[in-house]
Image (cartoon, rainbow, N blue to C red):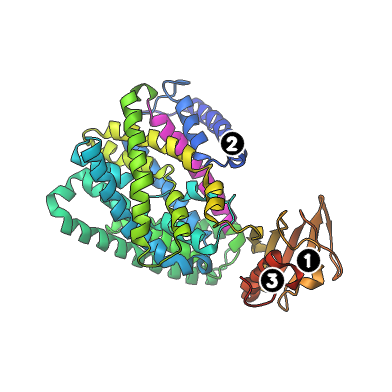
Amino acid sequence: MSFDVHQLDTVLLVGSAVTLLAILAVRVSSRAGLPSLLIYLLMGVALGEEGLGIPFEDAELAHALGFAALVLILAEGGLTTNWREIRPAMRLGVSLATIGVTVSVGVVALGAHYVLGLPWETAVLLGAVTSATDAAAVFSVLRTVPLPRRLTGSLEAESGLNDAPTVVLVVLVSSGAAAEEGILRMILQILFELSGGVLLGLAVGFGGAWMMRRAALPSTGLYPIAVICLTVLAYAGGAAVHVSGFAAVYVAALVLGNSELPHRGATRSFSEGIAWLAQIGLFVMLGLLLSPSRISLETVGLAIAAGLILTYVARPLSVLASSVMQPMPWRELGFLSWAGLRGAVPIVFTTIPLAEGVADSERLFDIVFVMVVIYTLLTGPTLPLVARILGVAQRYEPRDLELEAAPLERVAADLLQITITPGSLMHGVEVGELRLPPGASVSLIIRDGEAKVPERRSVLRHGDELLVVAPRKLRELTEERLRQVSRGGRLAQWLDDD
């Protein structure tokens, strides 16, 4: 098949237009509390053969491109994850990604076979592809909900880790290896691939961090490219030695993202941009792969029924079983049960049996596609309400705390950006009354679009944005002090203020 410059011009025209529309859609989706993936999927359907007429039916290509996009998305997740924040919830996150996945697969498979009447192979595949949560879907919604770190940490760890066991299981079932080798050997193979992927990710992460600290590259822009290449190397290395590449890429990115590397801020910004581009391309491609004319009332009914089993039976049971490793109050477990957004990951995983030519795989793809759309619309916008009803939302938690470390690398400091929200008790507090740790200081106040250098007697107001410079070793203390003042006002104590 030839590809000339005129075709290239057409691809660039359509691609750039679609990407710009997708970027604008982020603002619309964030205001509505919806993951932007839904808009991207519908854009793909509109561009497809039954819409504007762009044909796309290559399941193998969709499988390959989908995995490539997931690698970049997982890399960004690891690079932007703060290890200190997820470490307290890591036990529950790992438990959700292993015990939780096992319970979810079993419950959905049993329900799909005995209740919905699907063949065993299709039922097991349905349970497997829908067992993994989607980090992009979860956190695009959770940005609007201030939650305790143990909850966000659990969800973040689960979303980053549960792709690895799920994809191994789906590949084994789709290829027929699971039926040939038996359950015990399949479990041992999954454990081997996961442990091998984790070890490889640790090796690439620590080795890459050591190398990056000693490399004197001639341009700042080369550092982010090098870090992304290291994460992709972890995935490709895992695939080459037949261990879990998804586990390897996430662990390597987690290590690199939490290491003292040059230009960390630039690296994180670059990885976020790459991940957004991967998400847009992935979701639009999956929308192109769908043929709306195949969607029947029976398919919609099966999708709704399967979603009911997953949302109201499998997910709560998987969270409950996983909490054995790290008990939590029932209110927080209830929120974790409702916050298990699936997103595009299950749709990507259905391209595996499609590429393998598994019987009934097109039907499985259609069921999962419809189920993701319906239940993302149901659970996504209701997460803030559920958090308030269950009492897990932190009303006075300072939000929009962002870090940009690249400009301050030479002095080993971080620049924190804080927005004083309407419910914050920081309103009316003087800058000197913040009592930040020695060495940390408020360098700038932005009010009504105007910036000014503060004095000790400068009074803070709702809507102010503060730029706080803190030595890296004092960053945690500085953040905690700001949270304490936001919750308790000027009389907040330095310690023991929950």
Q: Which of the two residues, 257 or 474, is positioned nearer the viewer here?
A: 474
Measure the C-alpha gap from mark 3 to mark 1.
Answer: 10 Å
Amino acid identity at mark 2: Ala
Amino acid identity at mark 1: Ser
For residue 9, above or below residue 236:
above
Magenta range: 268-291
50 falls in the magenta region: no
Residue at label 1?
443
Residue at label 2?
25
Give the residue at x 44% y 46%.
341
Q: Residue 338: x percent and y percent?
A: 45, 49
For residue 50, above or below residue 199:
above
Quadrant of the rendering where the N terminus is positioned: top left
Amino acid identity at mark 3: Ala
Would residue 234 be visible to someone looking at this image?
Answer: no
At numbered mark 2, what does the secondary structure look like: helix, strand or loop? helix
Residue at label 3?
470
